[in-house]
Amino acid sequence: MKTDQKNFVQKKDIEGPSAPQESRWQEFWRLLRRNRLAVAGLIIFVAFFFIALAGLVLTSGTSPVFDPAMVRLQEKLRPPLSEPRLEDLRPEEVPTLGIYLLGTDDLGRDVFSRMLQGAWVSSTVGFVAVGIAVLIGICMGGISGYFGRNPVRVDHILVAFCVVVGGGLLLAGAPFSGGVLLLIGCAYILSPLWWRKAWGRQSATRVMRFLYKDALSIDTLIMRLVDIMLCFPVFFLILTVVALLPASMYNIMIVIGLTSWMGTTRFVRAELLSLREQDFVTAAKALGVSDWRIIFRHMIPNAMAPVLVSATIGIASAILIEAGLSFLGFGVPPPHATWGNILSDGKRFIFDAPWLTFIPGFAILIVVLAFNLFGEGLRDILNPKLRERY
Amino acid sequence: MLSVQDLTVHFIGNGRVARALEGVSYEVRTGETVCLVGESGCGKTVSALTILGIIPQPPAQIMGGTVLFDGQNLLDLGEREMEKIRGNRIAMVFQEPMTSLNPVFTVGDQIRETIMIHERVNEKAVRKRCIQLLKDVGIPSPEERLKDYPHQLSGGQRQRVMIAMALACNPDVVIADEPTTALDVTIQAQILNLFRELQRTRQMSLLYITHDLGVVAHIADRIYVMYAGIIVEQGDTAHIFHDPRHPYTQGLLVSLPSRTKRGSTLHTIPGTVPDPAYKPGGCPFHPRCQFAIESCGMEFPGMCDYGEGHVSRCPVLYERARPPHGAA
């Protein structure tokens, strides 16, 4: 410790008046440490991550350490920290820790094991859903921000319509009309191979001129799509979709992901609009870097700050949505315990066994709060305009 | 090597047309340093960006002309083919070293990328080349600098890195767009010397864009003087400096601060560069020109040949002129 300090002082002396070089991470830590709530959020974030990992390792497999599905009807609704009545239990039914740390539910299942498994399910849903949302958001925002000025022609719209509606009809069981539409669309896409070369764009008839008219820009298209998606009350949209789809953890993740990419899209687009005018983008172009490479390798890393923030907060809201769905009975189906369905099962016994409601409730509260606090701390650090406050 | 002919580029937007380039022609021969001189906004950078095909269209629109490089018209090439030329055969160094490097990647990553895009070489060879490049552009302890981020380097070093990136694939032509403007004078001289040396050792052609005549005298073989989107005078460095035949060039030269005229007021050219959307008719320089006669405002001036490649766009001075170089 002492030597460390000494070295530090010496190093500073050598560097003299020039500012000591600080790596990105050091600066990050220095700024983060000032925000206690964000640090607390980060600690809970990390702890939650390990708990979830433990949840996966310890509660899955054929003979898990903590078995969340072990039913002991004679031990139902035991309060937290109560000793098991060993005389009633077969050896394999005895809880691993020797006591019911968080009590048992109405089927005598160990709530602690179920919470562990729920932590894993919640975090998976949160991370995967946000991963999907961020991926879509980055692609859409990237295209919108970089290629935004490029026009979408009437024929593009018509072809997209043909392909989408044709495909839809085909799947919905109208093979003839669907097939014809799909064929028209594909034929038009492939037509330049033999056809446009022969006539060229110059000899445009009135129909052709109509087809080549610029209808709207890519930016307009994507941003209006975002607006439309934002108009839906997301929770009810998800409820509807989940009600139609077979219930499974994967469907939940995908549906949450597909309905929460709009914020990221907007952030990425906004960042890219300003980055596009930066010299290093022109410089990269001048060195022969292709457009897609510029977007994804040069610009997106520069635009990650707001995406990271919204992703952190997005995980919290995905966990919340999943819990809400599970609470309503539309969420992850029964063999998996999730915080939402523990809560939902427990609400019938709220007066007899309040821990069944309060424990998952608090867990959700703390995790969501932690993610939000950390996300906000991150935003303050990564946004140079807000940084001035410190 | 590289020849621009009759290049006309307009910027269209907000209901007005800014004529940035109006029939600009110049050429850069193999192993030659050519300077494009002119005030801000006269179209120097636009012409460079047009050569590389990275001028944003819209708002810009290429109305006509050709950019011949190795017998190919670059304006006709598709995006894919242009990507193979940019950075590989023609490279560019930009004005602002502070912002022209991507802040989130190390210097090594950025040089490596340029090489990896254009050539198939293994990691080790690339690393070696990166180090050699940094050595060539005069960066001390290049191995360590490879791991540095742009914000850890000084402006001069960043510009050296930019030059290293431009040289990475041994381009035939390097376009340098005011590479020393953002640097202070001592660093400026170093970078200029670096350019001179690199150009000599690598036998590349250099198109150097600047507004600084002091710089021009230092490195140019030939000079093109631009004003308001046209070339007003072109010729060897000696001819331009000792025998300027266009009032604008003459104005620029007497406006240079010099030691001999110390104490006297610095000469300036009256007026300002015209707005490219509302250029005066005839010779665009005539409202500021001390020799202007009535016809200057009416007719667009033609090129007047003084021999030995020295050409000026001022018929008035040509009429009055002493005999051309050749005859004298």
Image: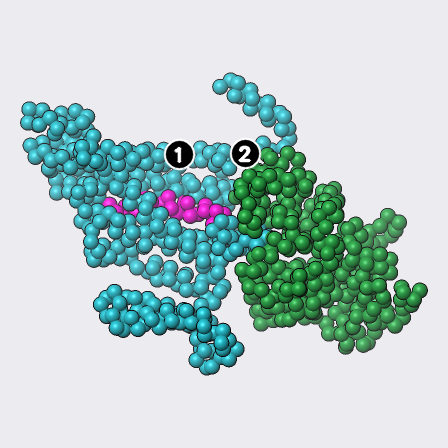
Q: Which chain is green?
A: B
From the top left corner, tell me how far across and down residue A237 is, in percent.
Answer: 26, 57
From the top left corner, tell me how far across and down residue A255 is, in percent.
Answer: 28, 53
Quadrant in the picture for the C terminus of chain B: bottom right
For residue B217, above or below residue A172? above
Which residue is identified by label 2? A22
Q: Are marks 1 and 2 on the same chain?
A: yes
Residue A358 sits in which quadrant?
top left
Q: Secondary structure at mark 2?
A: loop
Question: Coloring scheme of the render?
Answer: by chain
Say the numbered circle drawn on residue A186.
Answer: none
Residue lying farthest to the right in this orientation: B328
The answer, for residue B173, to whether it is visible in the render is yes
Q: Which chain is cyan?
A: A
Q: How many C-alpha atoms fall within 10 Å of the one at disc 2: few (<14), some, or many (≥20)? A: few
Residue drawn at 45 percent across, 59 percent down: A144
For badge 1, the amino acid type reads Val
| In this picture, residue A311 sits left or right of residue B139 | left
Residue drawn at 66 percent across, 39 percent down: B135
The magenta region covers A299-324
Residue B238 sits in which quadrant?
bottom right
Q: Secondary structure at mark 1?
A: helix
Is A323 part of what is drawn in magenta?
A: yes
In primary-sequence order, the first of circles 1 and 2 is 2
Residue drawn at 49 percent across, 19 percent down: A1
From the top left corner, tell me how far across and down residue B40 is, in percent.
Answer: 70, 59
Closest to the observer, A69 or A373: A69
Which residue is identified by label 1? A39
Marks 1/2: CA distance? 20 Å
For badge 2, the amino acid type reads Glu
